[in-house]
Structure formats: C-alpha cells, structure tokens
Amino acid sequence: DSGGSTDGGGGDEPFRVVAFTSGNQTPIGAWWVKEVEAQAEELGWELTMIQGDFDFQKMNPAVESAIGQGADAVFDGYTDYASIGSIITAANDADIPIFAIDSGTEATDAFVLNITTNQQGIVDQTLGAIDEALGGIEGKNIMVIGHDPHPGIRMRSNLAADDLVAAGAVLAGGEIQQVKSPASGRTEALALVADYLAANPDGLDAVWVGWDDAALGASQAVQEAGSSAFVTGVDAVAEAIAAIEAGTMLATIEQPWPSINDDVIASMVEYQNSGTLPSSNFETVDTTLVNESNAADITPSDQLG
Amino acid sequence: MSDEAAESAPLALEASGIVKRFEGVHALENARLDVRPGEIHALLGENGAGKSTLIKVITGLYDADAGEIRVRGEKVEFDNVREANAAGIVALYQELSIIPTISVAENILLGEQTPSSGGVVQWGKLRKRAQEQLDKINKKIPLGKLGFELSPVQQTMVAFARALATDAKILILDEPTASLTDTEIVDLFTVLRGLRDQGVAILYVSHRLEEVFELCDRLTIMRNGQTIVTKDVADSHVDEVISTMVGRAADELFPARATSIGEPVMTVEGLTGRRVQDVSLQVHAGEVLGVGGLAGAGRSELLRILSGAQKHVHGTIAVGDEMLPHSPGVARALEAGVALVPEERRSQGVMLKASIQDNIAIANLPSVSTSGVVAGGRIIDIAKRGMQDLQIKARSPRQHVGELSGGNQQKVVLAKMLARKPRVLLMDEPTRGIDVGTKAEIYRLIRRLAEDGTAIIVVSSELPELIGMSDRIIIMHEGRISGEVPAEDADEEVLLAYCYGKTGK
Amino acid sequence: MTNNDKAPTTSTVVMGHASNAGKWMLQGGTLVALIALILFFFLMRPDVFLGFTNVRNILYQVSILAIIAAAQTMVMVVGDFDLSVGANSSLAGATAAALMLGGTPIPIAILAALVVGTLIGLFNGYLVAYLKVSAFVATLASMTSVIGISYLVTGGTTLFNFPPEFNALGQGRLFEIPLPVYFAVVVALATWFVLRYTTIGRRWYAVGGNHEVSRLSGVNVRRVRLIAFVLAGTVSALGGILLAARLGSASATQDGNNMMFAVAAVFLGMTIARSGAANLVGTMIGVMIIGVLANGLNILGVNAYIQQVITGLIIVAAVTLSGLRSRER
Amino acid sequence: MTNNDKAPTTSTVVMGHASNAGKWMLQGGTLVALIALILFFFLMRPDVFLGFTNVRNILYQVSILAIIAAAQTMVMVVGDFDLSVGANSSLAGATAAALMLGGTPIPIAILAALVVGTLIGLFNGYLVAYLKVSAFVATLASMTSVIGISYLVTGGTTLFNFPPEFNALGQGRLFEIPLPVYFAVVVALATWFVLRYTTIGRRWYAVGGNHEVSRLSGVNVRRVRLIAFVLAGTVSALGGILLAARLGSASATQDGNNMMFAVAAVFLGMTIARSGAANLVGTMIGVMIIGVLANGLNILGVNAYIQQVITGLIIVAAVTLSGLRSRER
Ligand SMILES: Nc1ncnc2c1ncn2[C@@H]1O[C@H](COP(=O)(O)OP(=O)(O)OP(=O)(O)O)[C@@H](O)[C@H]1O
Ligand SMILES: Nc1ncnc2c1ncn2[C@@H]1O[C@H](COP(=O)(O)OP(=O)(O)OP(=O)(O)O)[C@@H](O)[C@H]1O
Ligand SMILES: [Mg+2]
Ligand SMILES: [Mg+2]
C-alpha cells in the first residue's frame, strides 16, 4: 500500500513500480494482481497497482498519472500494446522501461521485455490432439471459435484456421466464428454451436475454441445435441480440466504463468540492481497440452493463487 | 329538508381557519366552509381565490398550515385521498381528466372501486357496475374504449361517473361543467339533484353563475384565500355575488360593440379538413366574429386549420392580398399575421415549468434574436410589456407559469400571441374556467384589439358570451356552417336551433 | 340536409371499418415482422429452421431472456424502467453459486438468491416510488453497484461445480423439452395473469397511464410502483438462477445483453397494444423476434458483426412499421 | 383595495427570500455532493488530491466524458435520449483510425469521422422526430448496429500506430494542460452558449417542455428534435476522435461506460435547475462528480469492485439529496 510511504523508514529509496492490467475480471488477471502484490511486498518495491476491466479510457490515464508521479519501472500484465499507446508514450517520455507479461503476440520496441506463450505451439498441440482423436483431420468439419478483440486469441484462432485449411479440413461455417462479448462468451459459443448443429446434425467433427470459457459453452452445446464432436480450449481453468476428466472436453492448454511471471520479475530485479535491461525484448515459452492422461496433475490456472 | 332540521343536524363537512401557503403564495388565509347534508353548496371566487386549494386541503392532498376540518362533527386529518374516500368524501378535481391507456369501464371503477375477489378482478361485475354508472348519467359510451379515444366531453362524463360510483356522502365537484355542453349539463344537474335528495352533501365550484342560481341551495364566496360570506342562494343576487367576489362593484360585463368595420382581412374558401366540411368565411379588420356550435362541431378544428396547426384537405386561406400556401404550418401563418390562442390552456397554451418570459419568447424568437442569437434584454422587454398590458399578476417575468392561477395563465398565452401583433387573432374558448372579473377584462381586451384594426375569430360554447362579445356570429354543425347572424339580431333560441342543425342565413 | 347530415357519419363509419384492417396490419407490425422473419428463415433453410430440434433450440435460447423481459414488462407497465434487471440476475446466480459452493443446501441457496433479487427490487422501488428518483438514474446506479457486488461475490472469477440437481434445473428435460422453457412459460403465464386479471396488475396500468389521476382516484401510487420493482427484482433473480444452472457456472457479467434486449422486447411489444402500453403478449413476440433473428442468422452462417448490424436494423424496422400507426393520428 | 393588493406581494417577496436558502441547499444537492466529495478526498489525502498534477489528471480523465455528456445534454433538453452516443464515438474513432492507417491525410480522416457521427445522428433524429419511434428503442437499435459497424471497420481488433500529429490532439499539452481539456472546455462553452443564447437552444427547451405548445407557437418541432440528434452525433464523434488520439488506439468498444455515465451526469445536473430540465452547468457538475469519485477512490487505493459499488451509491445519494425538494410538493 502506498499510503505509508510518507515516512520512509529505511535509507534506500525503494524501487517504484507501476503495474497494471486491463483484465482484472479474468481469473488469471486476478491471480496476477495478487501475485505481483505479494512479490512486491517481499522485494520491498513500492508498488502502484492499477486495474481496469478493459476500460482503457479509465485505466490508461490512471497509469499515466502514476507514471507522472514518478516510477522506476512499469509492469504490464496481459494488456496488448495496441491499447496502451498513450501509456507507452508517457513511459518513453519519462524514460521508464516497460516490462510485460503476455502483452501482444509479436516483438515490439515498446517493451524492454515481453514474455508470452508460443501461440503456434498452442495451435500445434491442440490440433494434434484433435488430429489424434479423429484419426486424421483431412475432410473433417471443424469449427473455430475466436474473439478478435483479444490479440492472443485472435492470433491463435487465425493460426488454427490456417493450419486446418492447409491440412484439408473444412471450416464449419466457412470462417472463424466470432464471440462478440467476452462477458457472455459461454452463452454465445453455446448458441453458435447449438445453432450450427441444428442446421447440420452430424455435421461437426470438432470445435477448436480459443479459450476455455467459450470452449465450455461449446462443449455443453455438443453434449446437449448428442453430437460426438471433440472440443478443445486454451487456459486450463479448473472447469475445463474437470470437463476433460469427465470426458466432455478433449483437451486444453496449460500456460506456465507463474514461471513466466517469475522470469519477468527476475529481469526487473536485475534492472533494479544493476540497471541492465534484458538482451531480447520478446520471448515465447512453450505450453503443456492437458488431456485425459495428465489432467489430474495440472494446477488449474484459476486456482493459482 | 326544513331549515330548522338542517340547522340542528350535524354538518356534513366543516372547515375553519384554514391556512395554506406555498412558496411565496398565501393560497388560503383563514378559509372557512360548512356544507350540510342534502344540499348543493356553491363555492365561488375569482381565479386564484383558493377554491381548488381548499378542496385539496379537505381531501388530504395538501397539509394545511393551520385550521381544522370536521366531517359529520368529527375532527379529521387525512393523509391522502384514500383516507378521505374511506370517510365518504369524494372529489372530482379541476382539470383532472381520466387515464388515457385504460378502458372506460376501468376508469369508472378505479382503485378501491374495482370489484375483485382475492386480488383477482371480476371483469363481469366490473362491466355491469360501470354500465350502471353511465346509465345514471344517461351516457352511451362504449365500455371498452380507451381513455384517449374519447372526446373531451366524454372524458369529463367518465370522470363524473367515477365520482358517482363511489357512493360518496360528500361529493365535491371542481368546475365539472367547464368543458361540457348544455345537454350534458342538464343530465349532470338531474343526477346532482337526485343525489341531494338522497342526503348527499355536494360542494359545487363553478364560474358560471347562472348554473349556481339554477342548481345550488347555498353559496360561499372566497376572495384572496379568505371566506367572505356564506348565504342562501335565494337571498342572493347576481350583481351582489359578483361584486363580493371581485371586491368592488360589478362592471358592465360586455363592452360596447364596434362602430366601424374595415376591409376583409382573412378570406377562407371551401375549407375541408377531417371534420370541417366546405367552410367559407370572411373576417374584417376591427370585427369580432363569434363561432358557436355543439361539442365536436368542428370549431376547434377550423381554428387549428386557419392557424396552420392542422393540415387540411382542400380549400384556400388568404390574409389580406396574400394567398397562404396549402397547409402553411404555424410558423408561416404567424408570419402572415395569423395567431391562435388554443383551447387547452395547460396542454397547448403554456409550458407550465417554464417562466413567463420564456413562454412569451417562444412565439417571438424572430423578433428577439439577431442571426440566431437571442437578446435576453429584448425578451424581458416584451415580457414586461405583455404583463403590463394584460395586467398579469405575477412576482416577476421569471416566475413559473405553473404557479399562476388559470386566468393569469390564459393572459400569458394572450401576451405571447399579441406580441406578434397579429392581423387575425383566433381564440378558442378564451374564457373557459375563468372568473367573471377576468372574463370582463378579456372581453375589453378583445374589443380594444378590434378597435386597433385586428380581425378576431372567437369560439365559445356559452351563447350569452357569444352574443355579448361578437359583432357577427356563425354557428357550426357537423363541420359545416349552419347559420350566420349579426350579433345584435341574435338570440339564444335561434342560435341553438342552428347548433342542432337547422340551417339558414 | 338530412342527407348531408348522414353523409359524413356514414363515411366516418365506413372509413373506420376500411382502415381497421390496415390499422391492424400496422398495429400488428411487430407480429408481422416476426412472421416475416420466420417465413424468410424457413424459405432459406426449409429443412432445418422449423424442425423440432431447431424450434426447441430457439425456445431454449430465449427462455431466460423471456423471464427477464417479463420482469421488465411489469416495471414498464407502470411507466418506469429497470436497467438493473440484468445485473440483478447475474448477482442472483452468483449468490446461489457461492452459497452452494460453500455447502448451503440447494433450496436455501436458491431462496437466498431470490431474496437478494427481491431486496434489490425493493431498493430500486423505494428510490423511485418514495424518494422520487428518476427510474433511469436509480436503476442505472443500482446496476453499477450490483455489478460491483457480483464481482465481490464471485471474486471476479467464474464459479462452477454446482450440485448436479441444481444444474438439472437449467439443463434437464421433460418430454424432450428443456426445463427453462417450462419455467419461462410459467413465468410468462403468471405475469400475463397478474397484468390482466389482478387488481395490482390493473393498478399498474392505471398508474402507468397517469400517476396523478390514479393518485387522486385513491390508488396508492407509491406502493403500486414499489411492488412492480420488487416483483421485477424477484423474477430477474429467478432468471439469473436459471442461467447459472443452465450454464453450470456463474460470473459477474454473464447476463450479457439481457437487459438491453429485454427493454427492446418490451418496446417492440408495446406497439401491438392499442393503448401503446407494455403488455406481456407483445413482449413475448419481441423476445421471439430477437431469438429467431439470432438463431436464423447463425443458421445462415452470417458473420457475427454483420449479425449485430442487422439486428439493430430489424428492431428499427419492426418498430417503425408499427409506428406508422401513431403517425396517422 | 390597493392595500389588499400590496400585502400579499410584499410577504411573497419575504417568504421567497426566507425559503431560498433552504431551497438552494436542496436544489444545489448535486453541487453540495460534489463539494463534499472534494472535501472528503482532500482531507484523506491533503498532500495529493488537490495538487496541480492530480487536478490536471482529473480534468484530463473527464474531458472526453464531458464532451459526450454535452452531446447527451442537447438531446435530453429536447426530452429525448441518445443511447448511441458512446457507440457513435467509438465508430468515429475507428473510422478516423482506419482511414489514417489507410493513408488518408489526418484532416480528411477527422472530417470523415465527424461526418459519420453526424449521419448517425441524422438517422437517429429522423427515426425519432419524423417516424416517431421512441428515442429509447431507436437509439438502442442504432447503438447495436453501430457497434456492429465498428467491429467491421476495425476487423474486431484494436487499431493503433497513428501519425504522431494525430495522437498529439489527445496527448499534447499547452501550458502544462492536456489538449483534450481545452477541447472539452470549448465544447462545454459552445453548448452552454447554444442552449442559453440561441434560438435553436430556446426551441430545444420549449420542445422539451411541451411539444404541442411549441408547435402551436410556430416551432418546427420535428426539425428542432432532428437538429438536436444531429448535433449530438457530431459532438459524440468529436469525443470519439479525441479518445482515439488520447489512447493512441481505436477499438469497437473503447467508449466503455461513457454513454451510461453521460446519462447519469445529465440526470445529476437536471436536479440543479428549477425547471428540472437538462442544463449544461448541471451536466458538468455531474461529470465532475463522476470524475472526482473515480480519481479519489483510485488515490485511496480502494478495491476496483468496491469502487464500483460506491460509485452507484454516491450517484443515488446525490440525486436523492436533490430529490428531497421535489418530494416536498
Ligand atoms: N402548487 C402550488 N404552488 C404554488 N402556488 C399555488 C399552488 N397551487 C395553487 N397556488 C396558488 O394558490 C392560489 C389559489 O389557487 P387555487 O387554484 O386554489 O385557486 P382557484 O380559486 O381554484 O382558482 P380557479 O378558479 O382559477 O381554479 C393561487 O394564487 C395559485 O397561484
Ligand atoms: N364525435 C366525435 N368522435 C370522434 N372524435 C371527435 C368527435 N367530436 C370531436 N372529435 C375530435 O375532437 C377534436 C375536437 O373537435 P372539434 O374541433 O370538432 O371540437 P369543437 O367544435 O371545438 O368542440 P369542443 O367544444 O369539443 O372543442 C377534433 O380533433 C375531432 O376530431
Ligand atoms: Mg380552481
Ligand atoms: Mg373546441
């Protein structure tokens, strides 16, 4: 808490970090907020944590004013650099480096470091699981459900659609199916799949979904229609893992956020101690496929905290 | 009921020492009233004398600042209308209409009156009882019609039927006849006399003194929030009542007629609208043309078409040498010098939540603005001039019109239109709900305008008024002109015959 | 002259009759729009659209919206608005979820959720009816607060893993039809009955028609308005509980666009009443328009963003078609 | 008699004065609420809250809301609503963004975005004023469609990488104060002037007061309503363009809660007018309440969810406080 900073007890100036995330209503975002707060406490950082529920209009100014009040480093949690242009400008003007976790899907000079997961790897793993379950993808009818406003989901759903078409599969509905609002992702995916199955009974072999919440809706629709289509998601939330164990979902992806976060914080500590910046500004980390065989051993991403 | 018996029986309703102040207004200042069972008691007074306020205090709509109310001898203090109803007091409020979106039957048996068992409405019983009420007042109105589908007359009758449905012991009627025609008034009076004979106490507010003398047993006169006198109608005389109301000797009600009538100012040929059929007429500078007829005869529609407020099917309107375009619209008609003072003051005439000056300004924007920017000073000027000319009683031009009495509201409408210096002034029932004093003022004003060369067309449902203030009278029947007479030759019988469709010149 | 006298009267009557058919066409504009939509989608996909599976699908998909729209109808009959019905339903779902996960028996969790919804309705109603706060601000503000509370209740996450008996309420079937459809039908019938046949329903209409006249006629306007909000709260909560059961999960914002669509449905429905007042039958037609549109466009495989554009336009078209009527006046 | 006539007048004036103070307290409830909030946050953080940096911050944070609230005020003066102002602003931002990224010069991109906003205003106005569709449905429906169009324009993504000159409009400073603050002040002053001193402003108020009275006074009611929607469209578009410049990015939904907050601000502001009509000064007080609240709670480090709960409650409290006045009647 920054309230007690007026009477600095120690001799050293504390390391001042402005951290922010736009996704505090997602389980991972909520975990990250707690995790960063805990680590900052341990490291003796003076942390300003700013959260916004995808309302950049409200979040960005708050971050900028925190930067304006003085900071040594900025920590971006899960917020695409496209949405924070003004924050990047403010940080650059003040000569403060931005470290990031999962904030955009490609390298950018905006960050001194952004560690994220390997989107192509995620697609390879999930499509591999589908391929194996179906005994070959070619000629199969597969629906891809994405959500364009989220850069990670957008990238991986595009990769998945491209790979599927390349492998000779038919994209159900002819294009990537879009969920409009993340808040009602589950309901929207449920309706998309239910309506598709009503129009094409037996016309669906698999549903590839960009994130678990919507995947759970898709899987529910598949169950209710009595279809045998396989559903995969990404995130490894507890509910998806339970669904995999129950056999209603085929697979999901575990992304190693705790270790990624540790890595980002380690390079921030490095910068704090020696002023050295990371050598590369973009790193991707491989993920783990979660299926029936290993579901029991995975820590769900929404129970990290 | 003999006088003695009446004296000894407990009063049905007694109010004494009532004081009620609104922000800045002493509406009631020591008002007093007593009504006996089995009498029709008139409550009289100028606009703003406090009649409606007194009624609202009695029925619990307003808390009095001081005073005491007794019902059948017992002191009461109602918190709301329901409690008053429970005590047998039912009021038909001034300008209270009906609910537009529900059926006639439901309007008649609203609220506690709705027959129900266990919270479920008994529709059959509802219709039967509603029909009984309508039968009482001799009205045929389909029970299934919705409120907004009724004519103003029908709406008033439904509201009256609702009051009757409550089996009130004390019935209060605040200007029930304001928008009724003679037939309805006759039916209404028959019912009221019947109720009186059953011992119901009736408090009756009206500005039509002839009604009072025909119907009522006693009368109470209020002035400036105070009760001046209560006496038997039999012992009273009209002139004396008027002078008590206004606090000075009664003036001549109608000013003298015009001596010189000028060139034609407005010429109308073959005008046909929805109800109006093939109407042609001419009105001259300095002339007051009265228009009479039964409710729904199409008088209001005629004025609305002439003022550009309503589209018409065919026919032409010319002002002076200028032929107006077909269905010109209000702005264009105003430009040509045609101004309308509409029928429904509160819904068509004034914005109740706006100040006097803003009300006046809205019809005069062209003259108080330069290239789209208004000059506040000029607005205040025309507002002050209008207030002075018409003697509008208000604190300042910035007072909200909703806080003024009905008569003063009407003067605001007039001031708004007169500031346009119209060549033709159309007035639809300009004295409805207005006291005799103010009425006389308005008659004088009409005459003054005529003398200044304005051509005036004025619609009225009161034949004496029509005869008194006009130079020439036309009568409409079912959309057509059924007769025309110079006012000095007119008598009520002839006019009435035209009203009912006899035609002639 | 008698001839002359008669003429307009007769023509009036004839006119009246002649225009009645046309008037009905316009008044029924919303219904016509629904039928047109159904016909269109049927012609596009005759094999699928009106098949049992798909009709069941549509009904299932609109069932919770129908419940929330019924709640909104009650408030709108009184002439008010409730922008918090959606947030309220999410909170009810979250409350039941959190309690069940904490070990509370299902019936008690459901009851508690209904009580929460009712209390929010009471809060809204008190603000609007007794403190005379405009319904728009009052319910906008309470919507804001209620969403915040939902976040607190769920801790910002999605709650799941409810007892199967609870999920069955949303996912179970009876005679091949999902249970929420029955709930929606029961709520719709009950609301219809209350609006049409009970004294409180008729008072709602009276108050909605004109507050002042109602008050002066002895209707307890404040209580009547309050009750509408309270019941709307309870019914929205029921919708939210069913949504949680239907999805097997609960989050702070899972009501999605239900509030907006509920309001749109009521408005669509208002056009079918001669009085222009909110009414249950009309609302359900509105709900069906929204449901048929979403399902039909999905079945035709229309792009999600284009779907959204079309939905707006169809709502406008349906209301405008009916609106022609009021312009005639 | 002159005596009699005078007496009430004098006492009237006195009474008027006496009750004015109390009346002002109630009527100014919203202002009192703002002052109370400022005092509270100042006392909690005297070192920070009223410092130059933070005040500048607050102004910067509310500047775009202020512009959109000004647009909403115009429409609400006429007695209507525009639920599409937020979506409209997003579309304008997205349009300008897409054009600039496609190589269109900045001024032309901005102009095109303003035209798009104006056209949407025209569409809304036409529906409401000429086709008599209820403002709520019309703008709800157009909001839905406009969001869909924004998704199409942005391809569902966040557009960024605008020319620095464009971003400077939202991020640049003059005398230490960010440019959007100047824009907001100019828009507010212009709106205030239009509402108060022009014939169109007068006509808006008249139409908002009573359609029929206005019509019979020669006001072209339909055109006047139309113009309010058109201008609201233009002004919202301006807000959206500035938001894109301010964030350096544009997405279909970045208007966030602007529409809701704009409506809330206007409602808060209506309480300060004697007539109860929307007015610019009141709206800006409402905007400041919302801005101060968000900033102050952030400074105190209040949990985001609890912030949301408190925001709703404070809005209710402010409106209720002022509402006490009308309850007196
Ligand atoms: N709600 C109110 N607020 C302020 N002043 C009011 C209010 N109601 C009435 N008044 C004032 O109280 C006085 C008495 O009005 P009231 O309506 O009782 O008169 P009235 O005798 O019924 O007149 P009329 O014949 O025109 O109906 C008037 O000066 C009026 O302006
Ligand atoms: N019998 C009726 N049935 C339906 N509508 C009617 C009837 N009478 C009148 N109206 C409508 O009521 C409005 C007012 O009618 P009109 O202009 O004919 O009234 P008027 O002659 O001024 O009588 P009133 O004293 O009632 O104002 C018109 O718009 C007309 O269409
Ligand atoms: Mg009165
Ligand atoms: Mg008339």
Image (cartoon, coloured by chain):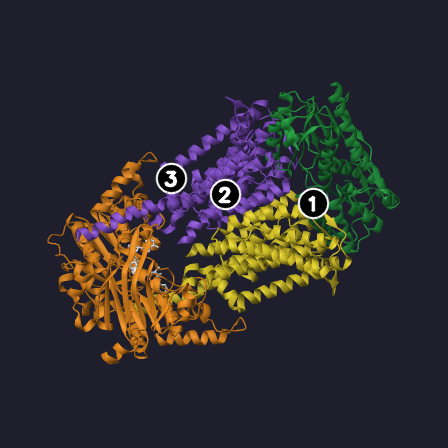
Chain colours: A green, B orange, C yellow, D purple
Q: How crowded is mark 1: few (under 14 residues within 10 Å), some or many (20 or more)?
A: some
| Chain to which mark 3 belongs | D
Q: Is mark 1 within 8 Å of ligand 1?
A: no
Q: What element carries label 2?
A: helix
Same-chain status of marks 1 and 2: no
Q: Quadrant of the C terminus of chain D?
A: bottom left
Q: Up-down: is C193 above or below B283?
A: below
Q: What element carries label 1?
A: loop
Q: Judge depth for marks 3 and 2 and give the one in front.
A: 3
Q: Up-down: is B418 above or below C57?
A: above
Kind of residue at badge 3: Ile
The Cα–Cα distance between marks 3 and 2, rounded to whole angstroms, is: 20 Å
Q: What element carries label 3?
A: helix
Q: Judge depth for marks 1 and 3 and give the one in front.
A: 1
Residue B367 in view of the camera: no
Horizontal placement of B467 versus A287: left or right? left
Instruction: Compare residues A289 and C32 and report the one nearer the observer.
Output: A289
Residue C155's label in the rendered image is 1
Quadrant position of ligand 1? bottom left
Whether label 3 touches label 2, CB < 8 Å: no
The Cα–Cα distance between marks 1 and 2, rounded to whole angstroms, is: 42 Å
| Chain to which mark 2 belongs | D
Q: Does the residue labelled 3 lie within 8 Å of ligand 2?
A: no
Horizontal placement of C209 versus B484: left or right? right
Q: Where is residue B162 in the image (x, y as percent from the top left)?
A: 39, 70
The Cα–Cα distance between marks 1 and 3, rounded to whole angstroms, is: 50 Å
| Chain to which mark 1 belongs | C
Quadrant of residue D45 within the rendered picture: top right
Instruction: Compare residues D123 and A188 and report the one nearer the observer.
Output: A188
Q: Up-down: is C53 above or below A268?
A: below
Q: Judge depth for marks 1 and 2 and give the one in front.
A: 1
Residue D123's label in the rendered image is 2
